[in-house]
Image: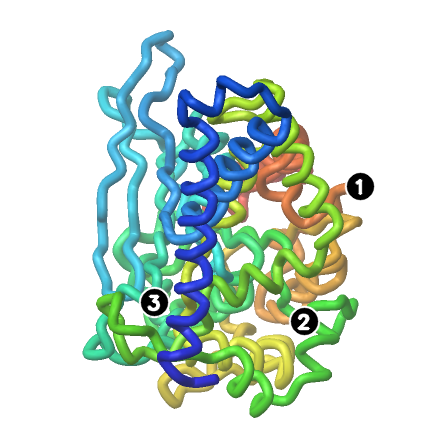
Amino acid sequence: MRYMATYDLMETMRNTSQWLGATARTMASYPAMALTPNPMIQWMAAWGEVTERTYERMVVKPDWGIRTFTCEDGKDHLVDIRNVVEKPFGNLIHFDVSGREEQPRKILLVAPMSGHYATLVRSTVKSLLVNCEVYVTDWHNARDIPVSCGKFDVEDYTLYLMDFMRHLGPDTHVIAVCQPAPLTLAATAYLAEIDPDAQPRTLTLIGGPIDPDATPTDVTDFGRRVTMGQLEETMIQRVGFKHKGVGRLVYPGLLQLSSFVSMNADRHVKAFQDQILRVAKGQASDHDAHNRFYDEYLAVMDMPAEFYLSTVERIFKNREIAKNEFVVNGHKVDIGKITSVAVKTVEGSKDDISAPGQCVAALDLCTGLPASKKASHLEPGAGHYGIFAGKSWRNNIRPLVLDFIDANSGTPEQADSKVVNL
């Protein structure tokens, strides 16, 4: 499978499906078709519209869609998204609310690199913008990164996070969502050892697989059943000539999307059938619930092959973070070196990706951290998405996280002197 032909074949199939949808929609929209009213004509136009949009979204990076923000002064302020640190595989971006005083809470939101763009945490960003300065890791699509930029694996990811934390300074509060939680914990520990003046004030880990074996799920079981050789042969392909990253080995976004969809195929099929009927009846709109969800869900990005393979092998199979045996650049990272960064974990009771027990395992690894700087929260009835972007996040988890940040916002000495019920 590690050939350009297989990569280009998937892109050809996607492109052809998009063309078929556009053709069906255009043909059914000819004025002459209206001479003979027929429900099949309306159905064909609706099928074409939904199909064209579906396959087109797969190769388009979604927009953040955060252009203005209403502040406490009652005015709408423009939001400028600025690149603060630029790197080949990802940038650190800042959501700068123009005309607003700088907020005391400086938050680094570490977005997942797991198939979707950082815009997946859009609603999380919007909820934090109310009274925080928000910075986000904006990872790049691997197919657009030239081979000359080199590799990018879990160690490089960790070093990127350390550079971002160094740039933002010690008054930063880090929130890691899902996949990056183990590596963010490692980056914090590494900083605590080699550059303690740059470590953040707090670290909040949300639904991350710190110890995948703590509570096995279908995701962790898959990592156990499949060998690394099988993964490399079946999942890894080489980027074709159409993109800047020609020749780079990647885990293609389209292949990832097929895996995502197959997990709940019946639900997705019904969703698209219902949408076609709504379009045919004139009940759909450009930004209805279906399009809002699938415009984001279908937009996928290629992952560097070495990052995907090293994540499966080192985080899930070998459990290097869970065993406190993770090595970066030949240096063994000791999570016990975290002694002043307050750490909080958040889990959802119905999370079927990072089940309860996987994330809270981080607290046991922080052997050098006093109990007063550790906190955990299990959200009843919440699934994976809900703990960082859904109703559970908005109503319950976000206030708890901000309270935790405020309780530990001073210098380590000042924070130690505060007595706050968390």
Q: Is residue 340 above or below residue 97?
A: below
Q: Position of residue 339 (x, y in %)?
A: 51, 64
**Residue 306, picture quadrant:** bottom left
The label number, if any, that marks residue 142 in the structure image: 3
Q: Nearer the viewer, mark 2 or mark 1?
A: 1
Which residue type does callout 2 highlight?
Asp
Which residue type does callout 3 highlight?
Ala
| Residue 344 vs residue 248, the one in the foreground | 248
Of the numbered discs 1 and 3, the one sitting upstream in the chain is 3
Element under label 1?
loop
Q: Position of residue 341 (x, y in %)?
A: 49, 57
Specify few, some or many for label 2: CA neighbours under 10 Å numbering under 14, 14-19, or 20 or more. many
In three-dimensional space, the C-alpha distance between marks 2 and 1, rounded to whole angstroms, equals 22 Å
Element under label 2?
loop
Element under label 3?
helix
The label number, if any, that marks residue 211 in the structure image: 2
Query: At x 45% / y 48%, what residue is drawn?
Result: 20
| Residue 333 vs residue 83, the one in the foreground | 83
Query: At x 57% / y 78%, what residue is drawn?
Result: 312
Residue denoted by label 1: 381
Q: Nearer the viewer, mark 3 or mark 2?
A: 3
In three-dimensional space, the C-alpha distance between marks 1 and 3, rounded to whole angstroms, equals 36 Å
